[in-house]
Image (cartoon, rainbow, N blue to C red):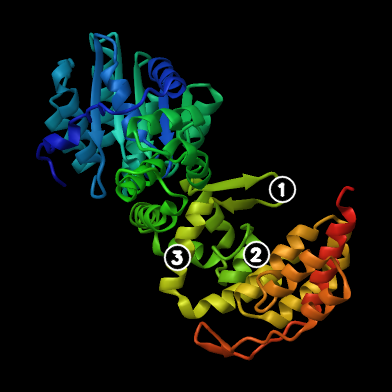
Amino acid sequence: MDLSGPATTKIQPPRARGARIARRALDEALREAMRTKRLVLLVAPAGFGKTSALAAQIAALEARTALAWVSLDEDDDPVRVFTALSAALEPHDLPWRSAPTALAGQIADDEAGGTRAAVAELVNALAASEASHGVIVFDDLHRVQSPEVHAFLDALIERLPPQWTVVISSRIAPRLALARWRAADELAEFTQEALRFTRDEAHELAALEKLPGLEERLPELMARTQGWPAGLRLCFAALRGKAGTGPLAASARPAAVDRSLFDYTASEIIDEMPIGLHDFMVRSSVLPVLTAEAAQAVTGDARAAQRLDEIERRGLFVTALDAQERTLVLHDLFRDALEDRLRRRFPDELPQLLRRAAAVERDPLRRASLQLRAGDWVAAEATLAGEADELLLQGLAVELLRVIAQFPGLARAIAAAAAHRGGGRVHALALEPHGHAARSIGGRRRVAWRPGRAAAVAIDAAGRLERDRPG
């Protein structure tokens, strides 16, 4: 184990960014938590501004507040963490009774409870500090592989003197004894919900860009990123390069923005997953919503329930629905990035994954859409024909037409139905055979399909819309 001193960068707090906008609600809540709580936890995926938020608080710390910052790495063990922490605390002249290097040696030997003894010495030194308040920050805990480091942190937090606060930032929920501090109201948690930009903050950030037309595009970009700070900044950077000197065109987003978002999401989030979770999420991205049963049926992964636990623990751009069984919905941006990876990593599996997803999908419109994406026109037609009456009774004619529009050769039939509203000419146009060339999906040749029942369903839906139209 390494007993040498840490690199300076490991204990160097980050500087607050000059261009950072004021985030009043977040800053006030974080400042109060760092002043009053035993443990402050920031957990969110990459790009949510965890380190930036902490840097802003560090810059605003009150006088006589002691600060120790430790950036964590993959190969950290208790010795390296203790050594880095003692070096970060050195400017505050703690009254150690034993030299930190000797204590680090005890941890390395771990004889006669060396780690417990070192933690006890550290706690005593913190308690005897002259600082009115102290803050210890452990940044990027998600990088640490050693369970012994988590045990070391648990022991430190448990015995922490009242004038000190431990702050931890991580991309995933740490395996610490959080329940007891949560129950005792000694834990403040800041997740992606607290860290995402509000509409007002996004407008303030956009105003700094001085891009003509950006304000008008902001609602679209907020919907696309759902307030993800890095996502918004990537959008602005992509559009800045696309805009030149003129106003932003509506067509500026797809290639420039999505490519930037995909690249960041892939490198900072998807590539950081363990391989088992990575492949599970990539394959299950074809599902409109994730449940353990549906995900296992699609991916064949018997650990689907545990994978969903891990997804929630990592806060991976999902929303949990209020349902009897655990149901997760992927953020659109995250789903797009996963599906992009699916098409590149498992292209031959895509049609079969879509058919499996359709087989477990209860909603007929979603089921038909999945079947259409798989190129299974006959199955999609049968799904809609069997459910059309019920869907129309539910007032879902518009949604039904939207799905039918995905059939090859039906666009002209639906346009005619909308224009002529059920007359004889509509039936003639809709039922005219609009064959299409055989398709190749996932390397398999698909036979040509000609519209039949789906066209009739389209006519019924268009007629129902006309009858329901006021006046």
Locate residue 454, reporting x and y percent.
77, 76
SS class, disc 1 = loop
Instruction: Look at label 1 and name its amino acid.
Output: Ala
In the figure, 7 relative to 424: above or below?
A: above
Numbered mark located on residue 341 in the image: none
> Which one is nearer the viewer's eye here, 378 or 34?
378
State which tag comes first along the sequence, 3 or 1. 1
Badge 1: residue crowd in 10 Å (few <14, some 14–19, many ≥20): few
170 with respect to 92 (left or right):
right
Which quadrant of the view contains residue 214? Answer: top left
> Which one is nearer the viewer's eye here, 437 or 318?
437
SS class, disc 2 = helix
In the figure, 424 relative to 31: above or below?
A: below
Locate residue 152, reporting x and y percent.
32, 36
Numbered mark located on residue 340 in the image: 3
State which tag comes first along the sequence, 2 or 3. 2
Residue corresponding to mark 1: 323
Locate residue 355, reporting x and y percent.
64, 76
> Which one is nearer the viewer's eye here, 386 or 56?
386
Instruction: Look at label 3 and name its amino acid.
Output: Asp
Residue corresponding to mark 2: 294
Please report the residue visible at 52 percent of the width from the left and 68 percent of the height from the top.
Answer: 283
Q: CA distance from mark 2 to mark 3?
A: 21 Å
Instruction: Look at label 2 and name its amino acid.
Output: Ala
